[in-house]
Image (tube, rainbow, N blue to C red):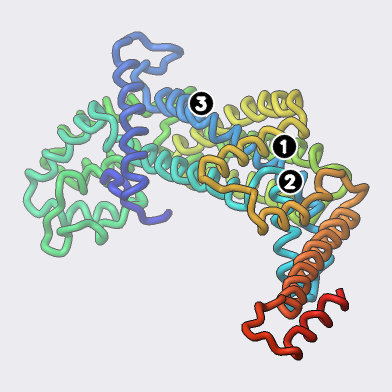
């Protein structure tokens, strides 16, 4: 088991506010479910597993605009990929300055053609990852964000603090029980003092067997600890009596209903990746570039890896993975239908229109000389080439034409400078003769 301490709320500059917002949503879900006291199939309505399910669905729906934006970026990238590959192949091995400039210009021309930029997809992915990391922190630190659950653990923590030498006793318990918390990382441990939050860090990782071991470690308050553990364990129950604090393979036993959690997590992620790959391949044409081959390998590796990891982590995290994949599969299905209905051409047109508005808002004008040269170098983009090689040649040809035009303008300016008629101050015969000679030579 890994050593971790997650109960303390995230207070980072970016993840802190996101975690607090997600924690507020999770706490609201729990308090709403607490209004109902009946049981459904033996599961209490105020149930952490049910909270995680509803919480995952709500967060994924809130992230839907980011997901759609990411899918649009992926489709545009799959369309650009063959053309960018052709440009890279064209200038492969060429390291001179002129070739690098041409390659940059032709690459930028492709991005302009599709109305996108290299950072668009990365920025969306970065925001999504920040939300994902914050969401993990909230799920791993349930008592830190759900007030009622914190109150349950607080009673047990206060009882432990009342026992003399509780810090050393708790440290020995953690080492023997191997519950995945490193007490040595707690602030104040060196002086033999653990805060209430530190103790709840330990208690939040306890399941049925470890609560019994904890009660044995504190015999003077064993009855009180077992009494506090009953409502805590109750709200962590799931279908079939599974406790989401346990890992699927308790005590090395692989033949339990909990083994379905890693299997389902692996299966759902595999279906999700296949659906995503089908969409990318459909819009990428017949050519399969190296990036798609790498993605195909990752889409096989990661589902298998997630199944293996689910064997070692609490069932609650596995439930989150399953529900998250199910929601993403549904979203992916409808997003694919929506984007297929729009069509690639319309998607590109909207992207170009959006880019034009951003440029206009930034005050970028196209009436200057450099803009005209750039327009000339990308003129061929309006005419669709038959192949990516043709596109690269056309873009390169226009670059050379633009460069030649610029060079011709420079030579003409130099010639005009050399032949410029300067006023003659004197009235000498030789001066007038030179003027007449220049005029007759034009």
Distance from disc 1 to disc 2, alpha carbons, whole Å, reads 8 Å
| Classed neighbour count for the residue bearing mark 3: other residues with Cα under 10 Å, few (<14), some (14–19), many (≥20) | some
Instruction: Quickly name the residue at label 2.
Output: 113
Q: Is residue 193 visible?
A: yes
Tell me the quadrant of the picture where the C terminus can be found: bottom right
Please give the name of the residue rendered at 68% of the width and 85% of the height, measured from the top-left corner.
Answer: 427
Secondary structure at badge 2 equals: helix
Give the mark, 2 or 3, whose residue is nearer the N terminus.
3
Residue 347 x %, y %: 71, 33
Q: Nearer the viewer, residue 441 or 15?
A: 441
Instruction: Quickly name the residue at label 3.
Output: 61
Residue 107 x %, y %: 73, 58
**Image side of residue 203 versus residue 343, left or right:** left
Mark 1 and mark 2 in contact? Answer it, CB < 8 Å: yes
Secondary structure at badge 3 equals: helix
Distance from disc 1 to disc 3, alpha carbons, whole Å, reads 26 Å
Quadrant position of residue 439: bottom right
Tell me the quadrant of the picture where the N terminus can be found: bottom left
Q: Nearer the viewer, residue 217 or 352?
A: 352
Placement of 194 over or under 196, stated as above or below: below
**Image side of residue 174 versus residue 434, left or right:** left
Residue 205 x %, y %: 33, 43
């Amino acid at each position: 088991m890994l050593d971790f301490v997650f109960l303390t709320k995230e207070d980072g500059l970016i993840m802190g506010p996101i975690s607090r917002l997600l924690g507020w949503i999770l706490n609201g879900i729990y308090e709403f479910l607490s209004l109902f006291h009946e049981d459904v199939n033996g599961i209490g309505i105020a149930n952490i597993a049910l909270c995680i399910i509803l919480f995952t669905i709500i967060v994924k729906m809130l992230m839907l605009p980011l997901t759609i934006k990411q899918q649009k970026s992926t489709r545009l990238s799959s369309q650009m990929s063959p053309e960018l590959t052709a440009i890279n192949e064209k200038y492969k091995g060429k390291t001179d300055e002129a070739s690098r400039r041409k390659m940059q210009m032709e690459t930028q021309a492709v991005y302009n053609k599709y109305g996108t930029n290299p950072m668009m997809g990365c920025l969306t992915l970065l925001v999504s990852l920040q939300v994902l990391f914050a969401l993990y922190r909230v799920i791993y630190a349930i008592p830190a964000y759900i007030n009622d659950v914190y109150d349950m653990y607080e009673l047990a923590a206060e009882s432990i603090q009342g026992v003399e030498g509780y810090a050393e006793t708790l440290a020995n318990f953690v080492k023997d029980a191997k519950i995945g918390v490193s007490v040595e990382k707690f602030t104040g441990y060196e002086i033999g003092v653990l805060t209430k939050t530190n103790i709840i860090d330990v208690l939040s990782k306890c399941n049925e067997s470890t609560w019994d071991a904890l009660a044995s470690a504190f015999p003077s308050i064993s009855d009180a600890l077992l009494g506090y553990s009953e409502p805590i364990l109750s709200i962590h129950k799931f279908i079939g009596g599974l406790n989401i604090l346990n890992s699927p393979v308790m005590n090395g036993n692989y033949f339990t209903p909990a083994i379905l959690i890693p299997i389902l997590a692996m299966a759902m992620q595999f279906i999700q990746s296949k659906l995503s790959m089908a969409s990318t391949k459909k819009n990428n044409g017949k050519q399969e570039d190296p990036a798609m081959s790498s993605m195909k390998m990752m889409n096989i590796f990661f589902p298998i890896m997630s199944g293996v990891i689910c064997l070692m982590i609490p069932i609650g995290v596995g439930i989150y993975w399953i529900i998250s994949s199910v929601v993403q599969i549904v979203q992916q299905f409808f997003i694919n239908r929506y984007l297929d209905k729009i069509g690639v051409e319309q998607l590109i047109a909207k992207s170009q229109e959006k880019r034009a508005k951003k440029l206009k808002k930034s005050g970028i004008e196209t009436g200057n000389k450099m803009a005209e040269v750039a327009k000339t170098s990308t003129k061929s983009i309006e005419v669709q080439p038959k192949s990516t090689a043709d596109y690269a040649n056309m873009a390169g040809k226009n670059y050379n034409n633009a460069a030649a035009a610029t060079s011709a303008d420079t030579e003409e300016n130099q010639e005009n400078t050399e032949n410029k008629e300067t006023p003659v101050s004197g009235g000498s015969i030789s001066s007038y003769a030179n003027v007449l000679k220049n005029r007759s030579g034009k």
